[in-house]
Amino acid sequence: MRILLVSRIDNQDALVFAEKLRALLEKEGSEVAFDRDTARSLGIPGCSLEDSRADAVIIVGGDGTILRMIQQMERPVPVLGINWGEVGFLADLEPSEALEFVHKLKCGFPVEERMRITLSDDSTCLGTALNEALIVTSRPAKMLKFSIIIDGVTTEQFRADGLLISTSTGSTAYAMSAGGPIVDPRIQGFLLVPLAPYLLSSRPHLINSDRHLEVKLESSKPASLVIDGQKTIDLGTSITIAVKKSEYPALFVDVKRNFFEKVDNKLRKL
């Protein structure tokens, strides 16, 4: 089995733990490589995901590290997250249990698919998100005007500081902080959460991913699109963004942990 190891590089303890993982995996007969950023921090050679031809990627870090790695994937590769951050909803294992689980990887592992969303302007792909895409004003304290178009029908128009277009996976991220519901990640849908809407009647919507969803921005103020907190695109003042289910889901190593039990445990840490 070929494994790519990725670690947050701003924490020495995380890097030391990644070295322990490498030693264990190599002892079990796996081929192990570090990604270039992690390897550079350790002072050793590294390689890209494509060059590694990895069967799985093990990430020691928080949600930001996991999202950044998934953004780099041209082809889906199963990811196993080991939480070395604050809460880490995308990281299924804590460091105290990771070594025992990794020891079993040589016997194979089940994979869980997580829906991603693709955003496009006409025929131009703007990006793909696992958690969410955020449309927000480029100038603080300025409101934006949105129209929500579902299956060709304008269903809602509102003004707000911004709009979150989230997946079910992302419902426990920014969307939850903005007042959105916690959604079972097995549900295939688009979660729309207005940020500080002008009218209280503008509420979160969960829309089936089979529907044709468009978000139209009409404002005198410029806006930006932020994808998974990793990529920022200037949108200007007027644009219509089509949102659809991505052809390629994100893949996670399934550690057989109940989602709702995990969320309850994570929320107790906040």
Image: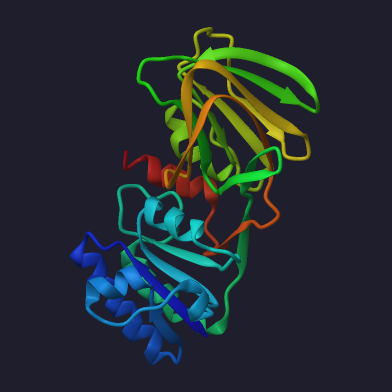
Residue 91 seen in this snapshot: no
Indicate the quadrant where residue 174 lies: top left
Residue placed at 78% from the left, 40% from the top? 210
Residue placed at 54% from the left, 80% from the top? 53
Q: How is the image coloured?
A: rainbow
Indicate the quadrant where residue 91 lies: bottom left
Q: Is residue 16 above or below residue 212?
A: below
Q: Is residue 149 above or below residue 93?
A: above
x and y percent of residue 230 in the render? 42, 47
Residue placed at 48% from the left, 26% from the top? 223
x and y percent of residue 140 in the render? 35, 20
Residue 161 seen in this snapshot: yes
The extreme left residue here reads: 12
Q: Quadrant of the C terminus?
A: top left
x and y percent of residue 245 in the render? 69, 46
Indicate the quadrant where residue 112 lies: bottom right
x and y percent of residue 67 in the render? 45, 53
Residue placed at 41% from the left, 83% from the top? 32
* Residue in front for this viewpoint, 178 or 109: 178
* Residue in front for this viewpoint, 125 or 21: 125
Q: Is residue 217 above or below residue 232?
A: above
Q: Is residue 254 above or below residue 49?
A: above
How many labels, in total? 0
Instruction: Report whether 124 appears left or right of 175.
Output: right
